[in-house]
Amino acid sequence: MADKDLRINEQIRVREVRLIDDKGEQRGIVATLEAIRIARELGLDLVEVAPQSVPPVCKLLNYGKFKFEQEKKIKDSRKKVKGGELKEIRMQPKIATHDLDFKAKHVRAFLEEANKVKVTIRFRGRELAHTERGEDVLKAVLSRLEGYYVMEKSPSMEGRFMSMVLSPKASIIKKVAEAQEASEAPREAPQTLTPAVPAVLPTGEA
């Protein structure tokens, strides 16, 4: 939900929505135009929060404030995440497909740990005359990372090197932060159950 802007007000094109009011109460299925009217009367926005539902779920929110709080949560998550290091993966412009797949998996693994990754192509000798091959390699890497990255620094040349910097998507950072919080949360010591001792009858008694 935080990866892209949500549709609000007139951007919501469906005929009706499942409405949640500003107090979090369910208002049932309401005509979209009516929901927008209610939002405006309250000085709020109609925000589509679950577009995949039928009909979509919409909330009455102050969208500017909501977006600010979402961005703040992402920043807080970044601070909590152990990681956030800048890793580097290097490769040659004449890299074989299976090696490219292997390197791309490493990049993805770093991103999944909430690290940034600098992907670098090193040109040697006459390879500098064909820097477009390096661009093709970087594009091939990106095609294998769909849904995992945000481009922080576009591909550019630095001497004999072409590099780009990728950041993990906000959803990945949030997931890593939540996993770390869960692992660090104090756990109750498991209760030790005393096994029941079967009664032993004296010999000869029934």
Image: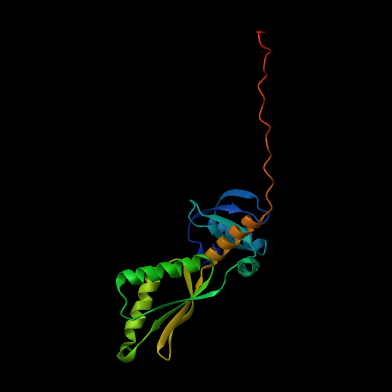
Look at the image and tell me in which quarter the N terminus lies: bottom right
Q: Is residue 165 left or right of residue 91?
A: right
The residue lying at 30 percent from left, 91 percent from top is 126
Q: Is residue 96 left or right of residue 32?
A: left
Counting every numbered tag in the picture gives 0
The residue lying at 65 percent from left, 50 percent from top is 25
Q: Is residue 4 above or below residue 21?
A: below
Please state which of residues 83 and 155 is positioned toward the viewer in this rendering. Answer: 83
Q: Is residue 194 visible?
A: yes
Query: Percent x, y for residue 35?
Result: 58, 57
Q: Quadrant of residue 176?
A: bottom right
Look at the image and tell me in which quarter the C terminus lies: top right
Query: Percent x, y for residue 164?
Result: 45, 80
Please state which of residues 45 and 171 is positioned toward the viewer in this rendering. Answer: 171
Q: Quadrant of residue 101?
A: bottom left
Please state which of residues 89 and 179 is positioned toward the viewer in this rendering. Answer: 89
Q: Is residue 34 above or below residue 129?
A: above
The residue lying at 69 percent from left, 45 percent from top is 189
Q: Is residue 6 visible?
A: no
Query: Percent x, y for residue 188?
Result: 69, 46
The structure's colour scheme is rainbow
Query: Percent x, y for residue 22?
Result: 66, 57
